[in-house]
Amino acid sequence: MSPVTAEPHPKNNRKFNKKMRLVMKEQDKGKKKGSLLKIKVEHFNFFYDTTRALKDIEMQIYANTVVGIIGPSGCGKSTFLRCFNRMNDIIRNVRYQGEIYIDDRNIFDKSVDVVDLRRNVGMVFQKSNPFPKSIFENVAYGLKINGVRDKDFITQKVEKSLKDAVIWDEVKDRLHKSAFALSGGQQQRLCIARALAIEPEVLLLDEPASALDPIATSKIEELIHELKKKYTIIIVTHNMQQAARVSDYTAFIMLGELIEYEETNKIFTNPSKKITEDYVTGRFG
Amino acid sequence: MKKNKIQEILGFNILRLCTGFVLLFLIIIFWDIATKGIGSVNWEFLTAAPSKGMTEGGIFPAIVGTFLVTVITAVLAIPLGMACAIYLNEYAKDGTLIRLIRMSIRNLSGVPSIVYGLFGVVLFVQLIKIDTSILAAGLTLGLMTLPWTITASEEALKSVPKSYREGSLALGATKWQTIRTNVLPYSIPGMLTGTILGLARAAGETAPILFTGAAFFLPFLPKSLSDQFMALPYHLYIMSTQHHDIARVRPLAYGTALVLVSLVFCMNFIAIVLRYKLRKVRLE
Ligand SMILES: Nc1ncnc2c1ncn2[C@@H]1O[C@H](COP(=O)(O)OP(=O)(O)O)[C@@H](O)[C@H]1O
Ligand SMILES: [Mg+2]
């Protein structure tokens, strides 16, 4: 915190603050990552009908960090992830309790338009789900439904998104061919490009590499490293090594409860709970 | 191991026999109609009106009538059926009322066509006073086809993977945008397939048009939708049971039957082609 306090009026100078944050991030690489609070989860419960799938979760997520969510299957990882863009709204008879703040705004507030929320919080699903359209149309889809008509802008944006998702070189010669002809790993990166095209601030990834071979997986992991410069990322994974590789913070969930949420390093080397240790060392799960 | 093998061969052949049996009947019926009807089907038969107390001439007015009525049926049943299906499948919340509506639709598709005919008379002719006409008959057939259209359209909507919808919603699309751009384009061929099958059935129905607008004999073509009309199935019914000289017009009746059956086959064929195209698009 010392560089900030050294300045006379740091709190009133937002531009300065932003700059300092960048500086700090450079300095503290690997230690305290990002200092801007992006997401805050408070006393959060989630119910499928009468079943309580998430129990009293408390969590704080900083901007430009990658948070990994691990836990045995069925513990509520996907359910939790789908709360951040309120994807669970489309399931019948579900109920939220508690708050999730993104940029200090409660996403369950009545004034929040869920369509706007989803524009801001992108999601990539476990099973890659390209639309039966061309590669170009897949990426342009989000722009078009959000009212972008400028053809040049769309073309540029599609190219940029595909480059950001590190798939441009593989598809640039067949942009107008069906997305279904791509391999699994390519399809998943296409889905990431599709999510990036509308410039969300938060990116939710639900086991994005679970169906992929090791090479495709490592590509996705590199991509996540790149993406966190611009986005705040929450990634669900059942693969412990993957969580250790890509995430700055790791949350361990069991039976809907957040058991431990710490810097990734600590979770994997020196967890404070016995059960976390048992899980990350593979003694169960 | 050996016993299983024998059982399998036996079971398989029994199934094959059943299929063959059904197919045999279809072939016999079509063969019968085709061989006895082909003699009377010629250019004149298809383009001329019946003459000399329907003992000579053709069936042109009946072809035109059936065509027009089917168009009205389609105009009512396709948009309304699709809209109902979209509402039921995409918007309606599962509740007692919706379940009741669904059940009614299923039941309606099993109601005998004569009941639709009588209902059409009461509703369109007596109550709304459209008079017996192409319009009244077409609307009656439309009502009869609706349950089929709705059910087929709902099935088509259901066959669009959930992941398309979720993917679209997650990109900030509204529900209607999602349906319009990412559900309907992939379900419309399926919807049309079911609808055409329903229309083919409607085109061959006699009972619903019997009281609502079909005429025994008209010397001229209908000039507007509020005119009465001749229709193929009704003409066939008359030629084979109501005519004063049934034995003499038998070949003409067979000819009419051949034309009607061919028409229905054609429509079903179009539906099959559509479905095939749809599958191909899906797999690409
Ligand atoms: N649509 C649903 N309706 C009811 N229960 C569900 C639904 N989806 C998931 N669940 C239940 O919620 C729990 C958490 O599921 P999920 O979040 O998918 O787990 P994970 O992603 O960690 O494997 C499981 O017990 C699951 O059976
Ligand atoms: Mg899951």
Image (tube, coloured by chain):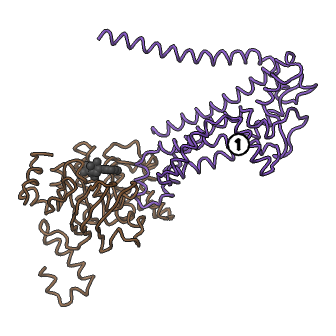
Image coordinates for residue A101, horizontal then vertical, percent? 29, 70
Q: Which residue is painted at 35% across and 62% down in the image?
A: A85
Q: Which of B127/A114 is in front?
A: B127
Type of residue at label 1?
Answer: Thr
Position of A128 with respect to B273 (left or right) is left
Position of B12 with respect to B75 (left or right) is left
Q: Give the structural element (helix, strand or loop) at label 1.
A: helix
Q: Which residue is painted at 45% across and 61% down in the image?
A: A143
Q: Which of B149/B113 is in front?
A: B113
Q: Which of B10/A239 is in front?
A: B10
Mark 1: is the Cβ under 8 angstroms from ligand 1? no
Position of A17 with respect to B73 (left or right) is left
Q: Colour of chain B?
A: purple
Tell me the quarter of the picture where residue B254 sits.
Answer: top right
Q: Is residue A212 above or below residue A273?
A: above
- Is residue A100 in sight in this rendering? yes
Image coordinates for residue A166, horizontal then vertical, percent? 31, 54
Tell me the quarter of the picture where residue B173 sits.
Answer: bottom left
Q: Colour of chain A?
A: brown
Q: Is residue B120 above or below residue B246?
A: below
Position of B112 with respect to A269 (left or right) is right
Q: Which residue is painted at 28% across and 65% down in the image?
A: A231
Image coordinates for residue B85, horizontal then vertical, percent? 55, 48
- Quarter placement of the C terminus of chain B: top left
